[in-house]
Image: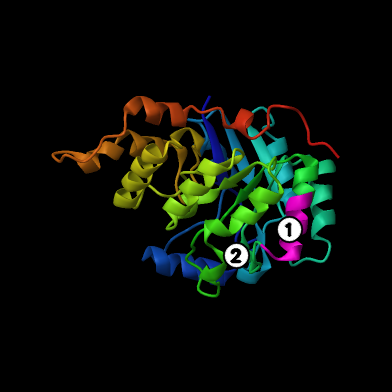
Amino acid sequence: MIVDVHTHIWEHPAHISDGFIADARISAGNPNLQIAVDLDAHWAAMAPVDRAIVLGFRAGHVGVLVPNEYVAEYVGTHPEKLIGFCSVDPQDEDAVDQLDHAVRVLGLRGLKVAPIYQNVHPADPRFVALMERADALAIPVLIHQGTTFCENVSLELANPVQLQPLALRFPNLRMVIAHMGHPWVAETLVLIRKHRHLYADISALYYRPWQFYNALVLAMEYGVFDKLLFGTDYPFTSPASTIDALHKVNDMAEGTRLPRIPMERIEAMINRDALSLLGLDAGPARG
């Protein structure tokens, strides 16, 4: 089973601001970069995978407000393949109630949060309250804990090590650190090594080939390759291009004495049963 644990849908200008897109274009060096998502294109892009997680994204600080209802409606059109995660902005006074509604009424199966985008420290009581409720609901949490292209954010919020107090406080809460926490890959790997229910996804890393290769070698050396989950960050990358890049990852070492990543380990990661690891094969969340 191939599971893409990290895909997005959104409309522009309804859900994402011009400022967010402008920052993305500057970072990419592409003034014509298009990141609005056509739902038919998303569905077509998911053809290589068996299941795909579709993430909500709510971060008023950077002008991204994708309605959880929008995500729920889309995944409801393909329930045999798509799994929806809500997103809640901890700065909203009713954030915990929003989470309850998204899970218990809309039927979304997990939570996406992003301290750097939401301008809330992981130790902030508002953020901790969301994690406490996610733990009670027994839903997984995908966390963007790493850098970003947005200009008006604080990197001080972004180091993955800042998730350790949450992992200690909620040892049964399944958390996925997006993008292997780049550029703090080593910090992510030592964190997921010591906490049984912490994982990382490899989404949106392969277009930095040297970092991608080194990150996977380091994961192998730390003995946590089996805690890496396949993900893409669609629309920024796609399942097909990510699988192709994984198959070519050892090209970086061609003609050198650098270590190779065994292809059987790559194939095992591509085909990892992420749903089981994240508790998404066990029915709906509890109340």
Q: Nearer the viewer, residue 150 or 286?
A: 286
Q: Give x and y (percent) for residue 208.
A: 34, 53
Residue type at mark 1? Val
Whole-number angstrom distance, CA of label 1 to CA of label 2:
16 Å
Q: Give x and y (percent) for residue 279.
A: 68, 32
Q: Secondary structure at mark 1?
A: helix
* Residue 92 relative to residue 71: left or right: right
- Residue 190 seen by the camera: yes
| Category of crowding for the residue at label 1, using alpha-carbon neighbours closer than 10 angstroms: few (below 14), some (14–19), many (at least 20) | some
Q: Residue at x 79, y 42 (%)?
A: 137
- Residue 89 seen by the camera: no
Q: Between tags 1 and 2, which lies in front?
A: 1
Q: Which residues are magenta?
A: 123-132
Q: How many marks?
A: 2
Residue type at mark 2? Tyr
- Disc 1 vs disc 2: Cβ atoms closer than 8 Å? no
Instruction: Name the image quarter holding residue 256.
Output: top left
Q: What is the number of the mark on residue 117?
A: 2
* Residue 221 relative to residue 136: left or right: left
Q: Give x and y (percent) for residue 232.
A: 48, 43
Where is mark 1, residue-wise?
Answer: 128
Instruction: Name the image quarter holding residue 10.
Output: bottom right
Q: What type of secondary structure mainly makes up the magenta span?
A: helix
